[in-house]
Image (cartoon, grey):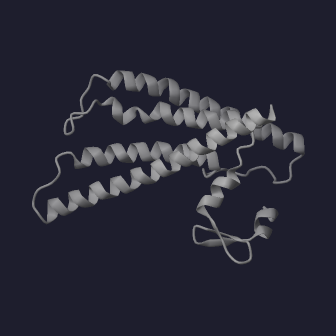
Amino acid sequence: MNKFKERIAMIINKIHLGSIYFAMTLLVGMAIVIIINVFMRYVLNTGLRWGEEVAKLLMVWFTFIAMAVGVKQGLHISLHILPKHLPVKLDIFFKLLKDIIIFAIAGVFLIYGIKLVQFTSHSIMPATEWPGSILYLILPIAAILIASEALMDIFGIEDYPDKIEAIFNKKDKTGDAKHRGFVISRKEIIDD
């Protein structure tokens, strides 16, 4: 059973890592389309007919992929109303409640995302002439990513987030992580 959990964790981590790189690609693609469109509009007095539409599509896809990544890494805003040092059982209960709520929200995204994709599948985007459902197809995909993370937490499958963090963080000579321009010491992490 332990090997099974490790295999699931490895697959989910690879999907998560792929979604991080996909989100980066979407963001870069959106920036390139916008820069080219602005240059063409203000320098060449013409523009890409499809530029705004494609940039909007890339932005929507980036937003939902980034949301799934944020759920995986716990990057969303949270309120710490209760004291940090709760009894262990109460702390476990609140973490389980959080994961159940996240799973329920992912279920709503999945159900209504599928309905939205079906509803817009007959409409055409005006500039690109792509099906309108392409814009909303990311909703069920992000819902599946979010639900899988919530289920892993609910069933206690360790997903080794430190392995993913190690890819994006470099260590300095003291062994402290350099994360987004800040040096985070081991003592700070332990104190939190």
Q: Quadrant of the N terminus?
A: top right
Quarter of the figure with residue 135: top left
Question: Taking the image as drawn, is residue 155 in sight?
Answer: no
| Residue 191 % position (x, y) | 81, 64
What residue is drawn where x is 63% and y is 50%? 73
- Residue 111, position as x, y percentages in the image: 51, 23
Above-or-below relation of 147 to 51: above
Q: Specify whether 159 is left or right of 2.
A: left
Residue at 46% x, 48% y: name it.
Answer: 22
Q: Position of residue 185 (x, y in %)?
A: 74, 71
Q: Is residue 140 left or right of residue 181?
A: left
Q: Nearer the viewer, residue 98 or 145?
A: 145
- Spot the residue most to the bottom: 173
Instruction: Say above or below: 40 vs 86.
Output: below
Q: Is residue 50 visible?
A: yes
Asked if residue 74 is positioned above or below residue 40 in the image, the reply reads above
Residue at image location 45% in from the left, 24% down from the top: 114
As rendered, which of 49 and 167 lies closer to the eye? Answer: 167
* Image coords of residue 172 (percent x, y): 67, 75
Nearer to us in this view, 27 or 104: 27
